[in-house]
Amino acid sequence: MPLHKKILIALVLGLFFGIVANLFNWNPWIKDYIQPVGIAFIRLLKMIVVPLVFASLLVGTASLNDLRKLGRMASKAMIFYLCTTAIAISLGLLLANIFKPGSIIESSQKSTVIKAVGNYPSEELIQPQSEPNIVNTLLNIIPENPLESLSKGNMLQIIFFALTLGISLTLIPGKHSKPVIELMDGINQAMMKIVVLIMKLAPYGVFALMTAVFSEFGFGIIPSLFSYTMVVFLGLVIHASVTYSLALKFFVGYSLRRFFRGIKSAQIFAFSSSSSSATLPVTMRICQENLGVSKEVSSFVLPLGTTINMDGTALYQGVAAYFIAQVSGLTLTLGDQITIVLTATLASIGTAGVPGVGLIMLILVLEAIGLNESSISQGIALILGVDRLLDMCRTVVNVTGDCSCAILVNSTEENLENNSNK
């Protein structure tokens, strides 16, 4: 049986078993004996993310004889990611304006849901956040200590250092650069082999993760927030199936059937892990093996996408900001909604691809449109119960966007090379 089918079966079984565990209050047992299996699986994948990204990106950069190609790939990827992020959040706001999810929930429901979630989120989450600043964002890309960046997994700084070192290796004599490149290529090959070995454990890890999530929350809280949940879900489906499909068909004429069949395993794992960073090794493998993306493109575009491509998260923020503002009695003007688009797009740059990061970004957006701390706290508490489920859905969209960008960059680069060889 193909691996993606095994993972899908494990996902369904985990969902079912988790709901049963929630109904019979088996959650403490699940946390003690089942959840650690899922955590161990995620840690195994996260263990190889940093060495995989650093080694593959360095080797890919050092292997490029034409540095202009690197500049082209970076420009295309950045434009694609930022444009689709802006489209995603605009789509979220459009759907929120049409369906107005905050008008359905009543004050009594609001109080009940907040109480069920556990009053307000922790003070650490609701503490004032600094608004995104383009100059500081760019400066933070440059690492003061590359070893510290590697140890902390700061992906943008790792990418910057790997690119700088890779370019430098192309500018020094081959007798000095060749041993370094061969060493990093060996590390890269070893990391990809570890991915293959870890993925044999994927069905067990996915089952454990899904069981833990749904044993804690179940579906009991969703009816109160049904309209909000459905608007976010509808937006994610539209963006994943329409926006990326149009981009692939219009710009490079890529087969949509091949695309969506090829990324199934990455999407399933993204859903179960809620982490685009943890999914990165799987995404790199399927892009190279299933989608025909070259190693040099996938090793650059996909790590970059994991860091700055937050389409699913941005769309969710548009709906969530509108929903919370509506519940709080605030009417969003066109200017407020433009502010949401700009703030969320900028905040997506450099945000880690880990579970729950969307809430931190959402706080920045809510502060930007003028909501006070009390309204933000109650609003976050209100949506917290369904956030984990929506986090799983929006991670699927993030990973789908990464794969589509890799195909677009790879196809346009191949066309340029073919035209230059004629």
Image: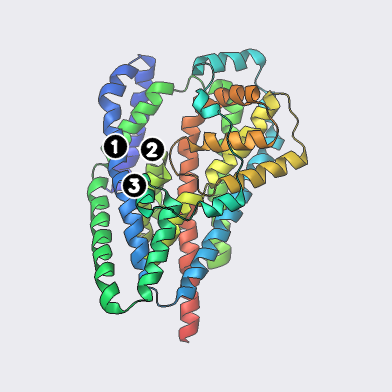
* Disc on res. 272: 2
Label 3 sits on residue: 151
Marks 2 and 3, how far apart at CA: 26 Å
Q: Tell me what residue is drawn at x 42 percent, y 51 percent.
A: 155
Mark 1 burial class by Cα count in 10 Å: few <14, some 14-19, many 20+: many
- The x and y percentages for residue 182 are 25, 68
Label 1 sits on residue: 205
- The x and y percentages for residue 376 are 62, 26
- The amino acid type found where label 1 is placed reads Gly
Q: Tell me what residue is drawn at x 45 percent, y 44 percent.
A: 353
- The x and y percentages for residue 218 are 43, 22
Marks 2 and 1, how far apart at CA: 9 Å
Name the image quarter holding residue 186.
bottom left
Give the SS element for disc 3: helix
Q: Tell me what residue is drawn at x 66 percent, y 17 percent.
A: 106
Q: Are marks 2 and 1 in contact (CB under 8 Å)?
A: yes
Give the SS element for disc 2: helix
* Disc on res. 231: none
Marks 3 and 1, how far apart at CA: 25 Å
Answer left or right for 388 relative to 204: right
Answer left or right for 278 relative to 68: left
Mark 2 burial class by Cα count in 10 Å: few <14, some 14-19, many 20+: many
